[in-house]
Amino acid sequence: MKQYKTIERDLSWMYFNHRILEEARRKDVPVLERLCFLGIYSNNLDEFFRVRVANINRMVMYKPETHQPKKTEIVEIEKAKKLQKQINKLNAQYSKEFGEAVEEVEKALLKEHIVIIDETQIDDSQRAFVRDFYRKNILGRALPLWIDSIKQFDKEADDTIYFIVKMYKGNQKPQYAILPLPVESCGRWVIVPAPAGGEGPKTTYVMYLDDIIRTCLPYFFPGLQYDSYEAYSFKFTRDAELEIDNDLNSGFMQKIANGIKSRKAGIPLRLVYDERMPEGMLRRIKQRLNGNGRLDTAVAGGKYQNHRDMMKFPNCGREDLKYPKWQPILPAEFCGKESLFEAIRHKDLFLHVPYHSFNGYIRLLNEAAINPNVRSIKTTLYRLAKDSKVIRALISAAQNGKKVTVVIELLARFDEASNIRWSKKMQDAGVNVVFGVEGLKVHSKITHISSNKGAGIACISTGNFHEGNATAYTDLLMFTSNRNLTSKVEKVFKFIEKPYSIQNFGELLVSPNDMKRRFLSLIDTEIRNHLAGKPAYIKVKVNHITEPMIVNKIYDAARSGVKVEMLVRGNCALVDNDDFNGNLRVVGIIDRYLEHARIFCFCAGGEEKVFIGSADWMPRNLDYRVEVVTPVYDAAIKAECLRIVDYGLHDNRQGRVVIGKPRSGAEDTLPFRSQEELYKYYSGIQTSNVSH
């Protein structure tokens, strides 16, 4: 069988993140939103280095202690070295583009009379304001450490910006200190008054917290009377815990994991520093980040680090420089005083957040908490909002005598501390908290409510039950009383509570049990139908596709003549080939909301099968996590799912064609932005040129 090319997952991710950077450079995007995209790009890159690049570097550095490297291990090491070079090359290229994008956005802000100034550009009146700000907000929140007292950065947080400060006094030897910036408590941005006597159009002046602190450096060293100060910023990224469930060789990664158990996790990995920093100061930092002064990556950057804080740039009273507000809509079924349970028992319901309000789900939990007929509530939680209405409702239900079980994933990356804190609060309130399955992340998004009267209710979602995410991520929530589904959702909870027990999940697709096999079977059916002259197509919306067997089966379908159209936001291993005859088309959408819903549509000979759920087409989702994908039976919801996918495939404003060609039909000549058209549709403003 002919082997077709694929793109390595991490290179594909770099290309995806670059599309976000491209969005920040678009002049038709409101300027404050362009700043936000720059912040998203930077934040994504930090996480990528902490997790993915950490794994690659471990492979490069792997040296078995008990034997010479085997041939297979040498092959994996060489592959990792090649990948490392490719990533570093792309990162250097994109870093240059990022710097250019920042300059472009700052110029655009200037045209709107928003000026970012530094410590060299303030007058005496502004300097007085800055000093007062220090006394009221910064004093006591940031304390310097003499660099000679730091042997190694092993306790310092890697999500912090630091200054290395050099102080002079006469002819004495200069002193060095490390100063963390208190961004968490003070914010990154400070609006300062206009200079004295300023005239002309009203201008807003904004300073980085960095420059506020530079102005006030003498106040951090009271009584020491230094003559002058120099301060240069830097940040470092530690690797996260080793991720086994990835696209790298799992067996080889397990050997590495076993070999580093005795080592301190999270060694510094990547250093980004002010390119103006003198070599002697840079050397002192490197020595304390890694004992031999060497790092996997050291990148000379600009004056400022942690550009993710651009996501929190103040709006300066200029809402006109942001996207127009789209108020979430609450469908009529979720608005009245009538029982939502009865509405769901009458007909399956769905929400498409953030177009629809997440309060619809909160309404369901609130009703469950007080309904005397409700016997139990079970739900999975992966990431939690700071002030979670979901947890408040669950605690209320427990206090009202309901049996409440919450499966919480303690290993949700970078949210571990928050999840542990909420777990304790729920346990104190009488909630039965289950901490997932050993060896498997619980990534499914499901809720089950049982009742003494009437059918039980289940909610199956494509995204987290998280109020914050639901304002920024597009996700689907389906509410059903269909016993074929609710009874199987309940079995998923039994599986989680008694791991690896034998369960029949019926019509649900559940990983790691049989989800991959069933997806492959669905694709095979489309191939057979097409070859038999029956209608056949595949339309899929996922975040990522990298699973080798799925990728190869998609190639088989396209080569066989099945029309395969996909919306893929992030990692995409697929590569076009002449053998596919234009049958494979992939579009990636970058817009105001992060595309997150997973929808799977198959023609099935004209009967159209539609599924939604939590799983992407990646090894980690199909082999290493508990995921749930449900069939959609309600004709109206099925039509809505198809609409969402079709709108995305028609998007010629925010959709970037990754594979294939732009559509060229008559209806594709008009500008079409899928997220805007969906919001208009849900608002009852029917202006779209895509018919359904």
Image (cartoon, helix red, strand yellow):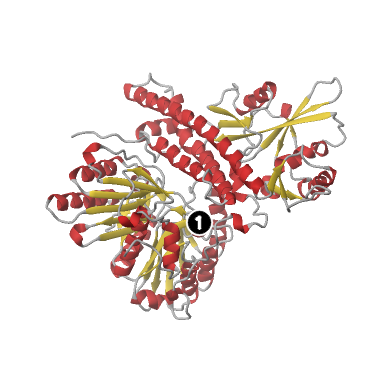
Extreme-left residue of the structure: 532
Label 1, residues with CA under 10 Å away: few <14, some 14-19, many ≥20: some
| Res. 389 in view | yes
| Residue visible at 29% across and 42% down in the picture | 551
Q: Is residue 389 left or right of residue 485?
A: right
Specify the quadrant of the image occupied by residue 577. top left
Is 88 rendered above or below residue 383? above
Query: From the image, which quarter does the N terminus lie in?
Result: top left
Give whichever of 623, 171 is nearer the camera.
Answer: 171
Is 670 rendered above or below residue 682? above
- Give residue 291's position: percent from left, percent from top: 60, 24
Query: From the image, which quarter does the C terminus lie in?
Result: bottom left
Q: Is residue 322 left or right of residue 217?
A: left
Give whichever of 91, 439 is nearer the camera.
Answer: 91
| Res. 512 in view | no
Specify the quadrant of the image occupied by residue 66. top left
- Give residue 23's position: percent from left, percent from top: 50, 45
Give whichever of 47, 3 is nearer the camera.
Answer: 3
Q: Is residue 274 left or right of residue 397?
A: right
Is 386 rendered above or below residue 66? below
- Give residue 35's position: percent from left, percent from top: 58, 47
The amino acid at mark 1 is: Ala
| Residue visible at 40% across and 56% down in the picture | 672
Q: Count the labels in the image.
A: 1
- Give residue 583's position: percent from left, percent from top: 24, 46
Extreme-bottom residue of the structure: 338
- Which residue was labeled with disc 1? 472
Element on which disc 1 rests: loop
Give whichever of 598, 480 is nearer the camera.
Answer: 598
